Amino acid sequence: MSQPLVILQGVCTGYFSETVLEEVTLEIFPEDFIGVIGPNGGGKTTMIKVILGLQPLFSGRVIFPRGRPVTGYLPQASQIDKRFPITVKELVSSGLKTRRFWFPHLEKKQRFRLKDMLAEAGLSGLASRPIGELSGGQLQKALLCRALIDKPQLLILDEPNTHVDKQFEQELYRWLQDLNKKMAILLVSHDIGTISPMVKTIACVNRTLHYHPSNQLSEEVLKVYNCPVDIIAHGPVPHRVLKVHDHE
């Protein structure tokens, strides 16, 4: 097996004196496609912040055996202010971490990369449009292009299917399956039924983390992993988490 990109080792963290994550251990490998599930407030977004280096630890370690990987991040749609005066091409190019911001123009190879990303997402005709004029699906495409423009080794998506239609959702997931051939993906979602046919493994986060090395979960398996939730099943694949986790 290949060497991990990221190792979370006994991570404990939170805000002020409140612990949000406790003894979280996870290894992310280059070929991984991990679905992250769990209740609101369970610590999913906090775990993302830990991986991105944005959240200080109370204890534990974050290890990068290969050096810190180039990481693309698609945040929740609710975190984006569509009133901000920026165009689609400006938004996407802001993901270029090697860009020299004191120089007003992109380098030639960066312009080609921007052009290719917009074309791949079907956004070429919207390049000069303000992001406030985009639909939910178009904005998510632009944000995903921003996350991908630096050719990341690890792609992290936080609820990417929120406020988008089913057509975009299906297109997005086909895109992610193709991207997984080139990078590791960490996908946070509430809808276990939608992501389970696509991801390779599942991590259940509710203060602690329970890792399941498969993409199919039954109610019995969730209980074994101390995640007693109700589910609706379509054949062997569960469809949706209905209740919050209870670790009492």
Image: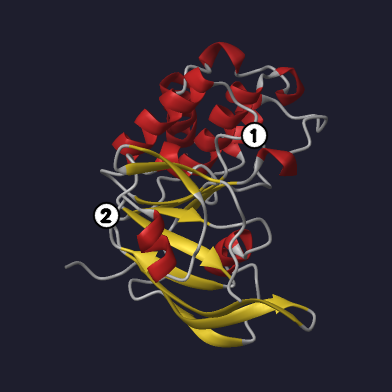
| Depth order, front residue of 116/20 | 20
Residue type beneath disc 2: Glu
Q: In the rendered image, which quarter is residue 26 located in?
A: bottom left
Q: Which residue is mark 2?
A: 31
Label 2 secondary element: loop
Q: In the rendered image, which quarter is residue 126 located in?
A: top right
Badge 2 density bin: few <14, some 14–19, many ≥20, Cα 10 Å: some
Q: Residue at x 47, y 17 (%)?
A: 122
Q: Residue furthest top?
A: 125
Q: Is residue 6 visible?
A: no
| Percent of width and height locating residue 192 | 46, 45
Residue 175 located left or right of residue 23: left
| Percent of width and height locating residue 125 | 56, 11
The scheme the figure's colours follow is secondary structure
Q: Quadrant of the C terminus?
A: bottom right
Residue 40 located left or right of residue 69: right
Badge 1 density bin: few <14, some 14–19, many ≥20, Cα 10 Å: some
| Depth order, front residue of 213/57 | 213
Label 1 secondary element: helix
